[in-house]
Amino acid sequence: MTDKHIRQLAQIISIPLSVGLLAPVVVASAAPGVPGNNDRLNNGIVTNVDTIKFQAGCTTKLKKSPQLEAAAQRHTVDVLNNRSLDADIGSDGSSVAGRARDAGYRGTVAETVAINNSLAINDLDVMGNWYYRPDYMAIMSDCANTQIGVWSENSIDRSVLVAVYGQPDQ
């Protein structure tokens, strides 16, 4: 579907009322370049990772870190806008450790990345893929990871979610 088709769909649509009159209904879409609110998805990932940690025998609940979230956001936007990226290294050569450090985080970090080549991404798809990847499962179930930052972004044909896990310096 092209941008032109999407704009056409967002035009006023008339639907019949029970009295036989037509009432206009406006279908709104997000402005180009304005990120959607994915808080529900992001919070669901935190909850699901916490569940995996508890199943692994961990006793501490994950805490959200604004610095790790900033690092996750930076990489999410980078992966969303650079189609050649599909893992942990950024288009500028940055690593998860460098992005976390740049965001002000002090400690050991790890990262999991989900890319879906469509407008939507959901926590079941993300967790289903991560659960069966031994490297990602090891990160998610590591009891030493006590902090997390999650960010996701969508475009018309690509969705990206990044979770950054942290072990703060003492």
Image: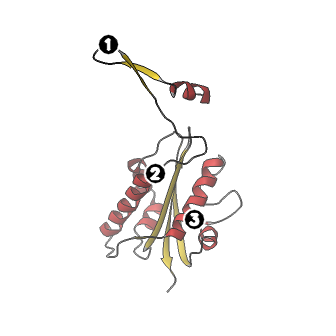
The reply to whether residue 114 is in sight is: no
Nearer mark to the viewer, of 2 and 1: 1
Nearer mark to the viewer, of 3 and 2: 2
- The residue lying toward the viewer, choosing from 132 and 112, is 112
Q: Mark 3 vs mark 1: which is more N-terminal?
A: 1
For disc 2, the neighbor class at 10 Å (few under 14, some 14 to 19, many from 20) is some
Q: Mark 2 vs mark 1: which is more N-terminal?
A: 1
Mark 1: which amino acid?
Gly
Would you name the residue on which mark 3 appears?
A: 71
- The residue lying toward the viewer, choosing from 8 and 96, is 8
Among all residues in the image, which is located at the extreme left?
A: 18
Q: Identify which residue is drawn at 48% across, 70% down.
A: 65
Among all residues in the image, which is located at the extreme bottom?
A: 170
| Place of residue 108 in the rendered image (x, y in percent of width and height, measured from the top left) | 54, 76
Q: Mark 3 vs mark 2: which is more N-terminal?
A: 2
Mark 2: which amino acid?
Asn
- Report whether 143 appears left or right of 153: left
Instruction: Check disc 2 and report its element: helix, strand or loop.
Output: loop
Mark 3: which amino acid?
Ala
In the rendered image, the vertical position of residue 73 relative to residue 58, given as above or below: above
| Place of residue 42 in the rendered image (x, y in percent of width and height, measured from the top left) | 43, 56
Would you name the residue on which mark 1 appears?
A: 20
Would you name the residue on which mark 2 appears?
A: 38
Quarter of the image for residue 157 reads top right
For disc 1, the neighbor class at 10 Å (few under 14, some 14 to 19, many from 20) is few
For disc 3, the neighbor class at 10 Å (few under 14, some 14 to 19, many from 20) is many
